[in-house]
Amino acid sequence: MKKQIIIIGGGIVGSTAAFYLSQNEHVNVTLIDSGLGTATRAAAGIICPWMAQKKNQDWYRLTSEGAVFYRQLVTDLEKAGAQDIPFKQTGTIGLKSRPDLLEKIQKIAEKRREDTPTIGTITPLTGTEIVDYLPPLKPDFYGIHLEGGGRIDGGRLIDILQERFLENGGARLQGQARLLDQHTIELDGQNLTADHIILATGAWLPHILEPLGYQVDVRPQKGQLLELDTELDTTDWPVCMPYGQIDILPFEHGKIIIGATHEDNMGYDLSLDPDKIQAMQDKATEFMPSLAQYPVARTRIGTRAYTSNYAPFYGNMADLQNVWVASGLGSSGLTNGPFIGWQIAQEILGQPTDFDRSAYSPDNYITKL
């Protein structure tokens, strides 16, 4: 008899887990998603955690492994017949205002490259050297280019993952699911049972677990992005991480995505804030003045999940061993989310992951009242 698995949440973690689980002929997988507020569908991200100066080494270890894992994910999707996979290793430029700050980042990246060869060549840039890599940039900053950095369109990625999942015989349902116990969920008045249940609901995890008497250390954060359509040849441009709160991501066909906001205390609000959109475009033009001439073509809005210490967690629950959870990924979800989804799938299938996830235990964030 095939093992029955239900996944609630069609974002990056749930979709990746669904794809890998559906490749096993001994399981049946059902993916349930409400279709509202998914952070991944709204997101576009830079896959390059190697310049981050966060002191949380557990965060870095997971997120660096997630960035490296993208090469395996692309290979596995191609083997499954997927085309036009929206991850591209374009290289990443980080900008600094002073040469001493540039030297600090260079030393950090070079040290990390000893354990992570994927980082590739590290090249410091000044003046017109920056423009040679990314023409619209003003030659007024100090930059560093990491060859191994890349970018991803989150919405397109989960579309491809779910397409392959459905091609493999998976089932996809839409609606608001409710967890009844570690083997049962309720959807539209019907009870569905499974051997394993994966709760990949991001910021909505408290909504599912609190009715069962759990306190969950997860809060929502609103994120907004904007898209520009230009006539520029952006296909092979590297992504750019200016100092401050925005990233600039060139995609094919002249599309440039700028974002994102990090809005606390907004709950699950998905309304557009034109002032914040304009502020992000204005900030981008401080680094690339020519972007001011292009009107905003599209906007994206999603809800991220954060914990009180800004660290992610995932794994099976202590007293509900057949319920797996993942949340708190925050703005790093596009980088470490696929790796987390793959790990959960591997563990359910009884396969090794060769990664110690004890530092990310849900027990640190979910409490039985």
Image (tube, rainbow, N blue to C red):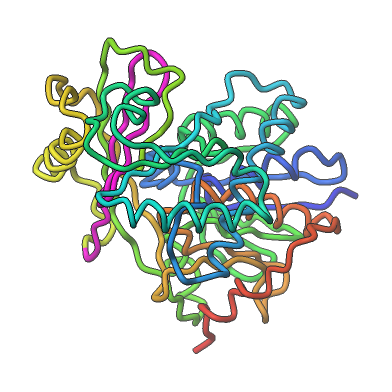
Question: Residue 236: horizontal and vertical position, in percent?
Answer: 46, 20
Residue sitting at x 58%, y 74%: 362
Residue sitting at x 56%, y 52%: 110
Left or right: residue 132 compared with residue 215: left
Magenta-colored stretch includes residue 263: yes
Count of numbered circles on the image:
0
Q: Which residues are magenta?
A: 242-265
Q: In the figure, 365 relative to 119: above or below?
A: below
Q: In the figure, 125 relative to 53: above or below?
A: above
Q: Nearer the viewer, residue 20 or 207?
A: 20
Question: Residue 330: horizontal and vertical position, in percent?
Answer: 42, 58
Q: Nearer the viewer, residue 169 or 128?
A: 128
Q: In the figure, 293 relative to 61: above or below?
A: above
Question: Residue 26: horizontal and vertical position, in percent?
Answer: 87, 45
Residue that extends furthest to the right in the rendered view of this protein: 1
Q: Nearer the viewer, residue 236 or 271?
A: 236
Q: In the figure, 299 relative to 62: above or below?
A: above
Question: Residue 221: horizontal and vertical position, in percent?
Answer: 31, 59
Residue that extends furthest to the left in the rendered view of this protein: 275
Residue sitting at x 60%, y 34%: 162
Magenta-colored stretch includes residue 256: yes
Left or right: residue 202 compared with residue 83: left
- Which image quadrant is residue 29 in? top right
Left or right: residue 292 compared with residue 152: left
Left or right: residue 345 compared with residue 270: right
Residue that extends furthest to the bottom in the rendered view of this protein: 369
